Image (cartoon, coloured by chain):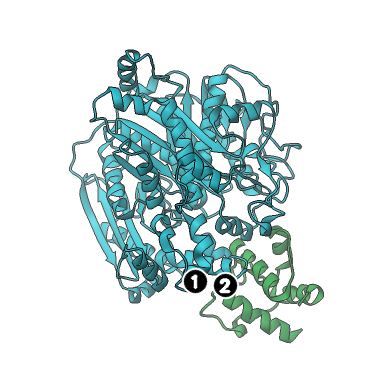
């Protein structure tokens, strides 16, 4: 198996406009959690990790004055420019052959929501500027980011697994390199603060009204944050080959670290809470260690997810103890510096992990004061220099999407092993399509009324098609669940935007189902599937990406059965808005497809 | 108090989308969470939103809500003592 070298990095967030500034801020023990007044007065009592640069200045930096561009996109472009420059991707393209395939893997959940929510009160009355609809969805946001860099990227894809999106983008990027689907990958995540998800998290009552205190006895929730971060990744041999070529130009590729392991697992417990025994986090960390060929005691530092909510920090502590036992390495959450930048968090914390590895220091757990029962005692010295070899970085998300990454100074022993490629044909065991809302009541075949009562229309369609397909295939628990959606929960998003415009508190039941990955999370709970779980959102290419991923998992012998599904819906308002911008959407109110793929072996 | 109990039952049925239930099906004294009606933590959040919207009562945390919401009668007593509208 090829070693994955990291040859470039870039970031913007509340503690810095570039990676170096982030390092300086942390070393000076300054932090980015601020009063919220210049974001929106309605959230005055909720501090947040806000990037201290206005939209108009972000536009100046990106040379896009006058256009309607989302903050999510602008931040991404800024961070990407730094990553590309340090990774010499431009120079590489110039000095090497043009056949190199450079792919952008982007994690985002809110996409262009910051623009949509500004326009929505007008849009719902048939007025206002509907151009924001062109980059409302995650896939279109990623496409716009990629196109900003001319011909640099030959392909792009969006991973949307809520708060683990950035980490999953980096893991997927490594898979694309290893399977030869990309030569250079730029992967990470971006997320702007929006009133939409600020209000949503507030209605779930998991926001701290003071600066957050991860792993502290008196922790009372998280502070949201924003930002973007990306790494450039290559197969090790290619990085050295390019480095040789570039030496002639007086440049060299700097390998800052290796991505030696990653694990993606699903907690399969609850849409917004982690299980008491931290099963998903435990499995993700264990899988990452296994891939890296490392023992738990080899890890020199863990950058924890550590959001500061009572539930996350306790369950993560339980999982950490299950993995590391008595040999607990230094652990810290850096969200006390940055806030929780949701889809960008995994990527921002990847940058922090890489900085720690490069500069041999352990970031401290800002905000912590008092130990609590069952909680790990985090690292608290902001000038703690130590020789680090392997750093683990955890990211967990709604839907139980848990991912753990391991970065190493040198390639690890196990990275040299190849996956056993199975030559068995991949076969389709079942395929079920639902495109009629009248069928949705049939969901009672699989779901109790007390559970069905809070399911959205799209969720019912997804559960019905998937459970029928699994039944037809004779599979109770698939090995992996892969979801594709272009627009996600449009009906719920619209209802929530209406509530936002009307000044109402957002309905918790709707908000927790509004992220794209809740479908895969729900299916994992129903099928007790703790395996690989991911959601793609790349317009009409979403299903293709999901199918490619599933086939790859089966080919590598990692999975025997994979549930792949694709779901989208529309509403009269959404249809009208998309028509206004010349992008007609599907005719059907709801459309859901579920496919069960298998390795074809009879011993399922 | 009985009027308030009926009103709360109707509001809760609507907010939690308990489609197949009518107010008579809910025992005002029965526990709401776990056994009894079988509600969960998300329902507790919905009831918190409901109390704020309908009665102007602001609770500061989900655990505070769960301690109060032991039965419909307990909620009714809390509302009658703390309502702002």
Q: Are marks 1 and 2 in contact (CB under 8 Å)?
A: yes
Label 1 belongs to which residue? A453
Q: The residue tagged with tag 2: helix, strand or loop?
A: loop
Badge 2: chain ID: B
Q: Is A425 on the left or on the right of A151, as rendered?
A: left
Q: Position of residue A154 (x, y in %)?
A: 28, 39
Could you say which chain is coloured cyan in the image? A
Q: Residue at x 57, y 20 (%)?
A: A359
Q: Is residue B59 above or below residue A309?
A: below
Q: Is A405 on the left or on the right of A600, as rendered?
A: right
Q: The residue tagged with tag 1: helix, strand or loop?
A: loop
Q: Is A437 on the left or on the right of A195, as rendered?
A: left
Q: Position of residue B79 (x, y in %)?
A: 76, 75
Q: Is residue A180 visible?
A: yes
Q: Position of residue A563 (x, y in %)?
A: 32, 52
Q: Residue at x 29, y 30 (%)?
A: A183
Label 2 belongs to which residue? B16
Q: Which mark is residue A195?
A: none
């Amino acid at each position: 198996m090829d070693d994955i070298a990291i040859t470039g990095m870039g970031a913007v967030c509340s503690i810095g406009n570039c990676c170096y500034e982030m390092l300086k801020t942390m070393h000076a023990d300054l932090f980015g959690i601020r009063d919220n007044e210049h974001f929106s007065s309605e959230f005055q009592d909720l501090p947040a990790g806000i990037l201290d640069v206005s939209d108009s200045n972000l536009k100046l930096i990106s040379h896009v004055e006058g256009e309607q561009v989302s903050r999510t996109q602008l931040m991404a472009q800024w961070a990407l420019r730094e990553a590309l420059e340090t990774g010499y991707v431009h120079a590489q393209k110039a000095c090497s052959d043009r056949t190199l395939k450079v792919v952008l893997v982007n994690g985002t959940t809110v996409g262009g929501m910051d623009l949509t929510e500004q326009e929505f009160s007008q849009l719902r009355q048939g007025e206002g500027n509907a151009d924001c609809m062109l980059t409302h969805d995650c896939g279109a946001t990623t496409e716009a980011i990629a196109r900003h860099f001319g011909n640099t990227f030959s392909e792009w894809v969006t991973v949307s697994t809520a708060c683990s999106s950035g980490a999953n983008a980096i893991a997927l990027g490594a898979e694309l390199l290893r399977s030869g689907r990309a030569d250079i990958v730029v992967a990470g995540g971006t997320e702007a603060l929006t009133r939409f998800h600020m209000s949503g998290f507030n209605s779930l009552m998991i926001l701290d009204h003071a600066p957050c205190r991860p792993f502290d006895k008196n922790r009372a929730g998280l502070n949201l944050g924003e930002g973007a971060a990306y790494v450039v990744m290559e197969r090790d041999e290619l990085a050295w080959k390019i480095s040789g070529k570039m030496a002639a130009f007086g440049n060299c590729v700097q390998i800052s670290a290796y991505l030696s392991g990653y694990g993606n697992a699903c907690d399969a417990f609850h849409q917004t809470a982690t299980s008491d025994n931290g099963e998903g986090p435990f499995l993700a960390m264990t899988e990452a260690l296994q891939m890296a060929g490392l023992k738990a005691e080899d890890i020199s530092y863990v950058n924890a997810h550590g959001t500061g909510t009572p539930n996350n920090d306790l369950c993560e502590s339980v999982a950490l103890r299950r993995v590391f036992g008595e040999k607990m390495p230094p652990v810290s959450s850096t969200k006390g510096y940055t806030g929780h930048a949701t889809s960008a968090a995994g990527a921002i914390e990847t940058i922090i992990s890489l900085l720690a590895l490069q500069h041999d220091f352990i970031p401290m757990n800002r905000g912590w004061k008092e130990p609590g029962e069952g909680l790990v005692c985090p690292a608290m010295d902001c000038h703690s220099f130590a020789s680090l070899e392997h750093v683990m970085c955890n990211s967990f998300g709604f839907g139980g999407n848990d991912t753990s990454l391991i970065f190493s100074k040198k390639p690890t022993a196990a990275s040299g092993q190849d996956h056993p490629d199975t030559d068995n044909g991949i076969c389709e065991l079942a395929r079920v399509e639902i495109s009629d809302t009248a069928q949705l009541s049939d969901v009672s075949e699989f779901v109790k009324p007390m559970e069905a009562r809070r399911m959205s229309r799209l969720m019912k369609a997804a559960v019905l098609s998937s459970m029928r397909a699994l039944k037809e295939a004779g599979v109770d628990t698939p090995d992996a669940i892969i979801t594709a959606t272009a627009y996600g929960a449009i009906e719920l998003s619209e209802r929530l935007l209406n509530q936002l415009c009307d000044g109402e508190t957002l309905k918790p039941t709707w908000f927790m189902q509004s992220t794209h990955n809740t479908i895969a999370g729900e299916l994992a709970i129903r099928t007790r599937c703790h395996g690989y779980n991911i959601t793609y959102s790349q317009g009409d290419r979403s299903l293709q990406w999901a199918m490619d991923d599933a086939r790859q998992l089966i080919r590598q012998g990692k999975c025997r059965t994979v549930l792949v599904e694709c779901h989208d819906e529309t509403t009269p308002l959404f249809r009208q808005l998309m028509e206004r911008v010349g992008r007609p959407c599907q005719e059907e109110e709801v459309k859901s497809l579920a496919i069960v793929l298998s390795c074809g072996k009879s011993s399922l | 108090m009985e009027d308030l109990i009926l009103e709360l039952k109707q509001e809760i049925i609507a907010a939690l989308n308990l489609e197949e239930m009518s107010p008579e099906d809910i025992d005002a004294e029965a526990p709401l969470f776990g056994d009894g009606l079988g509600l969960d933590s998300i329902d507790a959040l919905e009831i918190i939103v409901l109390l704020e919207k309908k009665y102007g009562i602001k609770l500061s945390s989900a655990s505070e809500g769960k301690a109060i919401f032991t039965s419909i009668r307990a909620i009714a007593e809390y509302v009658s003592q703390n309502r702002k509208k």
